Amino acid sequence: MKGVDLLVINANLITMNGSREIFKDYGIAILGDTIIDIKNTEDILENYKSEKVLDAKGKFIFPGMINTHDHLFQVLFKGIGKEKALIKWLADAIQKPFFNISNEDIYLAAMIGSIEQIKSGVTTIVDYQYAHGRPFLSDSVCQVWEDLGMRGILARGYTDSCDFPKYSGNEIVETEEDFFDDVRRLHKKYKNNANIDIALAPGIIWVMTEDGFKKCASLAKELDTFNTIHTLETEEDNAYSMEKFGMSTIDFYEKTGILSSKFLAVHCAQINKEEIKKLKKYDVRVSYNAISNMLIGYQTLPVKDLLEEGLVVGLATDGAASNDNQNMLEVLKISPLWQKAFYRDPSVIPALKVVEMATIDGADAIYKKDEIGSLEVGKKADFFIYNHMKANTVPLYDPIVSLVYSADENNIETTVIGGKIVMENGKIPGVNEEELYAKIQIAAEKLWERSNIKK
Ligand SMILES: [Zn+2]
């Protein structure tokens, strides 16, 4: 009898392994942050003992979901700047308060955004952190993840006002070199952290120099990480690139070396067939942000075309300023619905593919397929318990269809990340949620006031 740190018993496991097996009345043995065994409950109880046992009788366990694109600081901007197109939305909802955010503000925003995601089954977040009005704001996001036990990739962003909408009225607060220095600092700081990784996130095509993009490509190689960029979200990308560099965005990325197998392209809503082929040539990963694209009023990423080309596509909430929450279950439902309407074909993106994009493909999209994305021996113990015995999910015909089309947060009972229970029966241990929610309301009102945001 081997002592372990956590046991799960009597569960129905949606493994998302290579054969997409589903096991009934199974158990999981977890040692440290890793799954060390998956067997039927009887065998698990015969071979392992643990002080902590989660009995999931009659319930389902899914691998934790992966949110491939977010801006946690934008939780502070929830509800602001609605009914506006991208550039005007950026100016009104983001640029005005952007440089007024304090470390305390961003900590609260990241805490609440991460909690909402834990409650909707997310266990890994790629946070594209580009608010840099003062130093160490990225560290505040990582601190939240350490405090909660969240898994995350801090994609250290860079943005300036050089070619940004002239009316934003912001001044550059850090140089390109400051950005590279801070990426190196963060990389060093979190190198040995089991839950946190660092990536590079040059904001969008109009915020950096050609030399800056080349440096991003080589620094990602040096640090063995990846670049992620808002790519072809709207027509402005290509228009800017044609005018400034005399070529399309994708051709420019190819020229600078950014277009590579270590590149997560976000949005790609304006992509054409030729560009899809070019993304495949370089094995680029793609993040699909359905709700955000719809809210800003742009066309959709043609996901079926990308999948047919063999590209890896992950799902994402995007920041709360263009969503306006962090609920991954809404993303699960709306992502395929928009594709079905776009292609006028109900067979497009079946429920299993949606769950794949949220788990194993999402892991692939962020270069962590060997570590997370499925319930398999040797992988990190990241999962959630799905209790379908609620009004919105009974009767249950197929657990995968149920999760995609019927679920809400009250079905996500318990969430585990790296073997640590980060939510049990809907409660986040060690967090006074009511106090936290009152605090962010006050902090946000103060931020809106000093940023001159009025209704
Ligand atoms: Zn974004």
Image (spheres, helix red, strand yellow):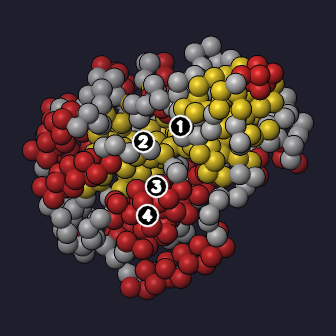
- Marks 2/4: CA–CA distance: 23 Å
- Marks 1/2: CA–CA distance: 9 Å
Please state the horizontal and vertical placement of residue 418, each as a whole percent of the image: 54, 40
- Marks 1/4: CA–CA distance: 28 Å
Q: In which quarter of the image is residue 211?
A: top left
| Residue pointed to by mark 3 | 146
Mark sitting on residue 194: 2
**Mark 1 element type:** loop
Front disc: 3 or 1: 1
Mark 1 and mark 2 in contact? Answer it, CB < 8 Å: yes
**Residue 89 relative to residue 442: left or right:** left
Front disc: 1 or 4: 1
| Residue pointed to by mark 1 | 33
Mark sitting on residue 73: 4
- Marks 3/1: CA–CA distance: 14 Å
- Marks 3/2: CA–CA distance: 10 Å
Q: Residue at x 18, y 35 (%)?
A: 222
Mark 3 and mark 2 in contact? Answer it, CB < 8 Å: no
Q: What residue type is labelled 3?
A: Glu
Quadrant holding the N terminus? top right
Q: Earlier in the sequence, mark 3 or mark 2?
A: 3
Please state the horizontal and vertical placement of residue 430, each as a whole percent of the image: 62, 63
Decide: few, some or many residues near mark 2? Use Cα within 10 Å; few <14, some 14-19, many ≥20.
Answer: few
Mark 3 and mark 1 in contact? Answer it, CB < 8 Å: no
- Is ligand 1 less than 8 Å from the beta carbon at label 4? no
Q: Earlier in the sequence, mark 1 or mark 2?
A: 1
Q: Which of marks 4 and 3 is nearer the N terminus?
A: 4
Q: Residue at x 37, y 71 (%)?
A: 103
